[in-house]
Amino acid sequence: MRLEVLHVPDCPNLPPLLERLAQASDLLVVTHTIDSDADAARFGMAGSPTLLIDGVDPFAVPGQPSYGLSCRLYRDEQGRIVSVPSADQLRDALDTITR
């Protein structure tokens, strides 16, 4: 399984996402800095940070803009807007992809 995190330079939400990924899994995480809209579209970054599991964005929301350099927002288990998914949400995403 390949875990990639796409982010803009100096993204303040990158460290918390990497910490929660470490809590959720012991898999290697590769990070990629994205600095243009063209690269965001090419790599599939729906805001920073974006997690891709085997090339799939498990948090993609149908109907929302697909790609961009803006900060990404997520919804927690209670539906509140947060800067990164919880460790439990990340574990669920990893489990869903491996099924």
Image (spheres, helix red, strand yellow):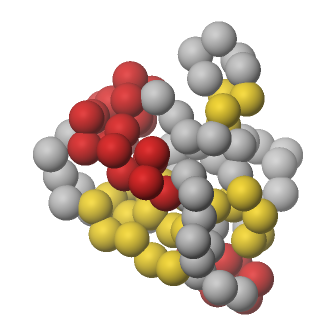
How many badges with numbers are in the image? 0
The percent coordinates of residue 18 (x first, y second) are 37, 51
Q: Decide: is 16 above or below 38.
A: above
Q: Nearer the viewer, residue 5 or 94?
A: 5
Query: Residue placed at 51% from the left, 44% from the top?
Result: 58
**Residue 91, above or below 8:** above
The extreme top residue here reads 78
Can residue 76 be seen here? The reply is yes
- In-front residue for pair 40/86: 86
Q: Image point 36% across, 39% down: which residue?
A: 20
Give the camera-side residue of 97 and 69: 69
97 to the left or right of 82: left
**Residue 89 image position (x, y, % from top left):** 45, 27
Question: Height in image: 60 above or below 49?
Answer: above
**In the image, what residue occupies the spot 56% across and 40% down?**
84
Residue positioned most to the left = 26
Left or right of residue 15: residue 33: right
Which residue is at 71% across, 43% downward? 73
In this rendering, would 23 be left or right of 47?
left
In this view of the protein, can residue 96 be seen by the observer?
no
Tell me the quarter of the image containing the C terminus: top left
Image: 81 above or below 98? above
The quadrant holding residue 92 is top left
* Quadrant hosting residue 77: top right
Residue 67 falls left or right of residue 95: right
The quarter in which the N terminus is drawn is bottom left
